[in-house]
Image: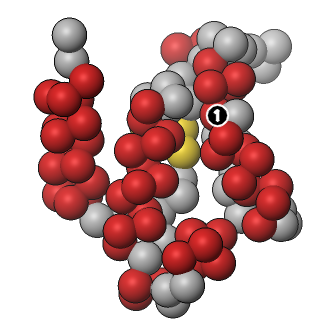
Amino acid sequence: MAHGITKNRILLDPGFGFGKTREHNITLIQHLDKFIEIGQPLLVGLSRKSVLGSISGGDEGQRLNASIAASVISAMKGAKVLRVHDVKATVDALKVVAAVIAP
């Protein structure tokens, strides 16, 4: 913001992968809600990440279910933007969750 970028154009991205261990990535997922306290929208890009393969045992082409689970968890922890490869499947899962947990 000190360089002229307005606050409404800034997203927080914890940067899953990018030099982090499996444990670092899992800890980030567990504590995503802490980023919300900063007051900026949270972007999460976990789709097909190797950490999901290390948990589920699947290679990149076999991480659909793990990616959807990670996206749902991220949304439930406050993520406003999800970077995904499988848009329709993720949207369908998020619609079901929203319908079930809606008041």
Residue 17 visible at all = yes
Provide residue 69's location: percent of width, then percent of height: 41, 55
* Location of mark 1 (residue): 32
Q: In this view, does 100 lie to the left or right of 45?
A: left
Q: In which quarter of the image is residue 20?
A: bottom right
Is residue 22 shown left or right of residue 97? right
Asked if 103 appears above or below 16 in the picture, the reply is: above
Residue that appears at 35% across and 72% down: 64
Front one among 95 and 10: 95
Q: How many marks?
A: 1
Pick the front one: 83 or 50: 50
Whether residue 83 can be seen here: no
Residue at figure coordinates x 35%, y 68% from the top left:
65
Q: Nearer the viewer, residue 44 or 4?
A: 44
In the rendered view, would you say 96 is above or below 37?
below
User: In this rendering, would 1 be left or right of 87?
Assistant: right
Local crowd size for mark 1, using a 10 Å CA cut-off: few (<14), some (14–19), many (≥20): many
61 w.r.t. 54: above or below: below
Residue 52 drawn above or below residue 54: above
- Residue 2 percent across, percent down from the top left: 81, 13
